[in-house]
């Protein structure tokens, strides 16, 4: 238990600045709320009492993978962390689809989001081109990762999912048809939005928060509760000077970045999915020439729609990944749904159709998700990038 607590925070106690930010977004990790090992064990038992998790949390083993441990001050990192040679080798080529973030979690010492963000910015040279401070960027992503719960506290919407979506977004942005379509600032915002799109996720849906009259639902008037929470939490972190990754930009560019990041996060709301899909399809079909897609004359709103589509596709990419990864993501998501179903039953709510661990058919639920949600979205993406892409082949 001590090892899990230590490694879940990257081997370091969270600094006071980050802890205050976490408190402000309503995230109190198990390892921070427990005053002693007995309390921590009680919390673990409470999480596992409905068989949503194994009866015993397995030992994580030694994960001392950070070659140069991040230097912490009251304001967070004071230098860019250097990860182990194994981690650097693992992240040397980010182009293949389906990065195994579960392995990355081990190589990066339970810091997959921080390690991956550094690799992406190093390989794309975005920070130097935008003249952004690499220490502030690293500090921001370190604190952002602390804003996510860890597995098994939250089974699916945790820092591993954030890292997976960020990598998928990075790969989708490299599609040849999109070459030159976006500015460096737009690409940077897409990566940030992907990393932050679920920060502070409590492991339950908007519908549950609304039905239980949670403080978050009250705060956001029952409208896109989680998505508003994720976006607000991201910019609340940036309000602290030591974490403001946009501080080197002009006021106009900062305002533009804020608008883009918020829009991309808000469009991950599944309540918007079908209307968004119709708009995405209409845009792609309008750009079809006789032989290929022409993106040379994109309006600002068209580029924004494409950026939202990239992050949304990355968020719904589980069924496009190699089978071992697809199966693991599916298992974790359904266990999180079942955990919510247990809570719905406890408070007297109707258990959601995918939340009943006793009656839900896992194969049927996944086939329906693919047929009605994932496949139509990825068919439009395939049309955009010219067809024959690995994602659609994998779904089929």
Image: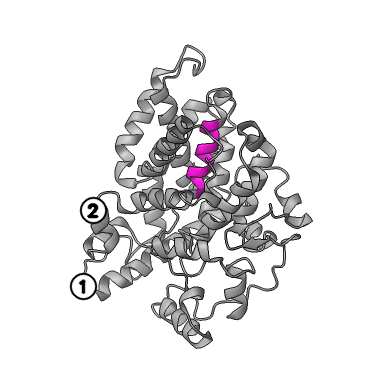
Residue 323 makes an appearance in the image: no
Q: Name the residue under label 2.
A: 222
Residue 238 makes an appearance in the image: yes
- Give the percent coordinates (x, y) of residue 59: 62, 77
Magenta span includes 189: yes
Identify the residue shown where x is 69% and y is 53%: 79
Q: Name the residue under label 1.
A: 348
Residue closest to the eye, 117 or 74: 74
Please tell me which of labels 2 and 1 falls first in the chain.
2
Q: Under tag 1, what secondary structure?
A: loop
Magenta residues? Answer: 185-195
Return the mark for residue 123.
Answer: none
- Give the percent coordinates (x, y) of residue 140: 55, 51
Magenta span includes 221: no
Which of the 4 quarters of the picture holds residue 248?
top right
Count of picture labels: 2
The residue carrying pointer 1 sits among few (fewer than 14), some (14 to 19) or many (20 or more) residues within 10 Å by Cα, namely few
Which of the 4 quarters of the picture holds residue 61?
bottom right
- Give the percent coordinates (x, y) of residue 293: 49, 19
Q: Is residue 79 left or right of residue 142?
A: right
Vertical comparison of 40 with 220: above or below: below
Residue closest to the eye, 63 or 359: 63
Residue closest to the eye, 381 or 254: 254
Vertical comparison of 304 with 339: above or below: above
Identify the residue shown where x is 66% and y is 63%: 109
The residue carrying pointer 2 sits among few (fewer than 14), some (14 to 19) or many (20 or more) residues within 10 Å by Cα, namely some
- Give the percent coordinates (x, y) of residue 12: 62, 69
Identify the residue shown where x is 43% and y is 39%: 258
Q: In this view, does 377 lie to the left or right of 83?
A: left
- The residue mark sitting in front, 2 or 1, is 2
Colouring method of the image = one colour
């Amino acid at each position: 238990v001590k090892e899990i607590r230590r490694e879940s925070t990257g081997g370091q106690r969270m600094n006071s600045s980050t802890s205050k930010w976490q408190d402000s977004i309503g995230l109190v990790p198990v390892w921070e709320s427990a005053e002693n090992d007995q309390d921590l064990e009680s919390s673990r038992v409470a999480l596992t009492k409905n068989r949503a998790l194994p009866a015993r949390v397995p030992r994580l083993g030694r994960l001392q993978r950070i070659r140069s441990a991040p230097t912490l001050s009251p304001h967070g990192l004071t230098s860019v962390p250097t990860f182990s040679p194994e981690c650097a080798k693992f992240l040397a080529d980010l182009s293949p689809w389906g990065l195994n973030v579960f392995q990355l979690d081990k190589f990066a010492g339970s810091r997959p989001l921080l390690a991956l963000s550094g690799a992406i910015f190093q390989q794309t040279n975005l920070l130097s081109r935008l003249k952004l401070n690499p220490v502030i960027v690293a500090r921001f992503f370190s604190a952002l990762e602390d804003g996510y719960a860890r597995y098994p506290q939250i089974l699916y919407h945790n820092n591993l999912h954030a890292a997976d979506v960020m990598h998928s977004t990075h790969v989708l942005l490299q599609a040849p048809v999109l070459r030159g379509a976006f500015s460096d600032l737009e690409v940077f915002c897409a990566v940030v939005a992907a990393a932050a799109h679920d920060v502070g996720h409590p492991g339950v849906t908007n519908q549950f928060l609304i039905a239980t009259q949670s403080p978050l639902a009250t705060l956001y008037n029952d409208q896109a509760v989680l998505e508003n929470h994720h976006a607000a939490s991201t910019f609340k972190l940036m309000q602290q000077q030591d974490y403001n990754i946009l501080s080197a930009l002009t006021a106009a560019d900062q305002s533009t970045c804020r608008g883009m990041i918020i829009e991309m996060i808000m469009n991950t709301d599944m309540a918007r999915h079908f209307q968004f899909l119709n708009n995405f399809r209409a845009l792609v079909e309008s750009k079809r020439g006789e032989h290929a897609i022409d993106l040379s004359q994109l309006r600002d709103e068209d580029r924004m729609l494409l950026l939202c589509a990239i992050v949304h596709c990355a968020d719904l990419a589980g069924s496009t990944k190699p089978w071992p990864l697809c199966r693991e993501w599916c298992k974790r998501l359904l266990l999180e749904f079942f955990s919510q179903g247990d809570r719905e039953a406890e408070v007297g709510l109707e258990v959601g159709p995918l939340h009943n661990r006793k009656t839900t058919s896992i194969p049927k639920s996944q086939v329906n998700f693919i047929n009605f949600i994932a496949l139509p979205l990825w068919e439009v993406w395939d049309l955009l990038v010219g067809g024959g892409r690995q994602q659609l082949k994998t779904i089929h």
